[in-house]
Image (cartoon, grey):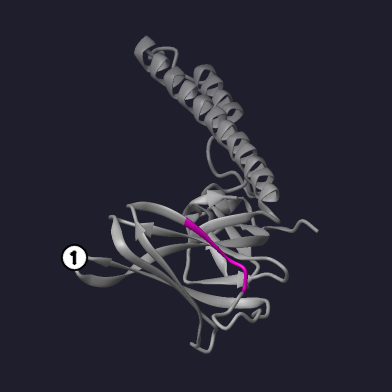
Amino acid sequence: MTTINTNSIDSLGLSAPQSQKNESLGQDEFLKLMVAQLRHQDPFEPMQNGEFLTQMAQFGTVSGIEEMQTSISQLADSLYSNQALQASSLVGRTVLAPAETGVLPQDGSLQGTLRLPAGTNAAALNIYDLSGNLVQRVDLGSIPAGDLSFEWDGTAEDGTKMPAGKYRVEAEAAFNGQTVAVDTLIGSVVNSVSLGGSQGGLVLNLEDGSTLDFVNVHQIM
């Protein structure tokens, strides 16, 4: 079942119009005041053309501000609707993002990508259970610079099948005679999506119980 948690339009960095007392001068009030001023002005010292034009300009400014506020409100509603629609399409999809742990599904495989900043003649992928025990080590040999996709079907070094669940993934490669850790991207299934993350965007709720800001997603698979 698709689940979308909508907090408020504040997640877009904009605020919905609030029902509150209007303390500012609106168009009607401004026009009434100007007409009253014309009616009650001193006939011996009538309003000068310059003063009249200045007040008309102020009236135009008030009108423009109100129209702008209406436009911003409509834009916020549109952005909110578009973001909610985008969120619903992510539920059930697999996303690739920086991570050290992933989920091995039942009768499936744990997917990910190694990110090599330079070519190497010795690279390896190590998979551990959550107790820190090495489950599988895959020697990858010589690899050019770039991204290398991988899949682990749950087979341990002794040939047995590991149970479904969370596993930690580490990659390493030799550069200039030194073995260093290599960044990994891990695939995770999106269970639900929330609106209103730390940066006001989408937050993905993943199958392993963790959350991920949408801005950190590298690929939707």
How many labels, in total? 1
Residue 140, compared with residue 209, is above or below; it is above
- Where residue 190 appears, x then y in whole percent? 65, 60
Residue at image coords 51%, 22%: 34
Q: Position of residue 50 (x, y in %)?
A: 35, 13
**Which x, y percent locates residue 209?**
63, 73
Does residue 54 appear left or right of residue 13 in this picture? left
| Secondary structure found at label 1 | loop
Asked if residue 151 is among those painted magenta in the image, a careful observer would answer yes
Instruction: From the viewer's perspective, tell me whether residue 114 is left or right of residue 210.
Output: left
Q: Which amino acid, mark 1?
A: Asn
Which one is in front, 148 or 43? 148
The spot of residue 37 in percent (x, y) is 50, 22
Q: Which residue is located at x 62 percent, y 56 percent? A: 94
Q: Which residue is mark 1?
A: 176
Which quadrant of the figure contains the N terminus? Answer: bottom right
Q: Nearer the viewer, residue 58 or 44?
A: 58
Residue found 61% across the figure and 80% down from its top: 159
Residue located farthest toward the right when viewing the structure as drawn: 1
Asked whether residue 150 is drawn in magenta, I would say yes
Asked which quadrant contains residue 117, the reply is bottom left
Highlighted range, magenta:
149-154
Q: How busy is the neighbourhood of tag 1: few (under 14 within 10 Å), some, or many (20 plus)? A: few
Look at the picture and state if 86 lies above or below 128: above
